[in-house]
Image: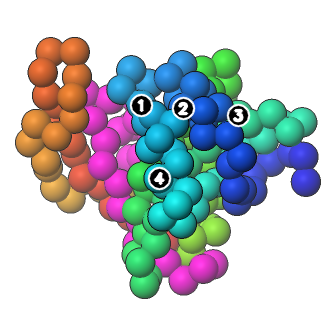
Amino acid sequence: MSEGYRIFIPTDAIQLAELESRAHTHGWSAAQYQDSLRCGHQFHGLFAAEQLQGFAVTQSVLDEAELLNIVIDPQWQGQGLGGRLLRELSASLAAAGARRLFLEVRAGNAVARHLYQRQGFVESGLRKNYYPCAHGREDAILMETGL
């Protein structure tokens, strides 16, 4: 399959880190992606003609899943791909037996928070001073949804 959504095993952690560095100011490093692969996390991707448009990383334990990271290539942002990726991975996780999906998001990331709310996520907690940012630390908003 060369188009659309699929679960995949990345072959180049450096490529993932480079894509993320174009999309986020404090993204994962290539070493973090390597660790994620070693831990058995699941990678969900959106592709167009074999070009990776965006991806998400999840982990599952029993009937719960956690969205660890989501990245849409900046050249593809604003076209609804974040919502599509979330819908596709939610369906895939539900088919595998997950009943709830959790995530955390930077408090200052209004675009992502709005995306998650449109996809049915609700706020369920707060982690104070969790993320590094340009001016020190930033809170993490915890969110969840049923699958």
Q: Nearer the viewer, mark 3 or mark 4?
A: 4
Q: Are marks 1 and 2 in contact (CB under 8 Å)?
A: yes
Three-letter code for the amino acid on which mark 3 is drawn: Gln
Q: Earlier in the sequence, mark 1 or mark 2?
A: 2
Q: Earlier in the sequence, mark 3 or mark 2?
A: 2
Circle 3 is placed at which residue position?
53
Asked whether the viewer can see residue 30, the reply is yes
- The residue that appears at 51% across and 45% down in the rendered structure is 33
Residue 26 at x, y percent in the picture: 36, 26
Three-letter code for the amino acid on which mark 1 is drawn: Gly
Tell me: residue 142, above or below residue 15: below
Q: Magenta part of the protein: which range?
A: 95-119
Circle 2 is placed at which residue position?
17
Q: Residue 143's image quarter?
A: bottom left
Q: Looking at this view, is 120 or 60 the one in front?
A: 60
- The residue that appears at 21% across and 29% down in the rendered structure is 132
Circle 1 is placed at which residue position?
27
Q: CA distance from mark 3 to mark 2?
A: 14 Å
Residue 79 at x, y percent in the picture: 66, 28
Circle 4 is placed at which residue position?
35
Three-letter code for the amino acid on which mark 2 is drawn: Ala
Q: Residue 88's image quarter?
A: bottom right
Q: Earlier in the sequence, mark 1 or mark 3?
A: 1
114 within the magenta span = yes
- The residue that appears at 32% across and 29% down in the rendered structure is 109
**Residue 86 falls left or right of residue 12:** left
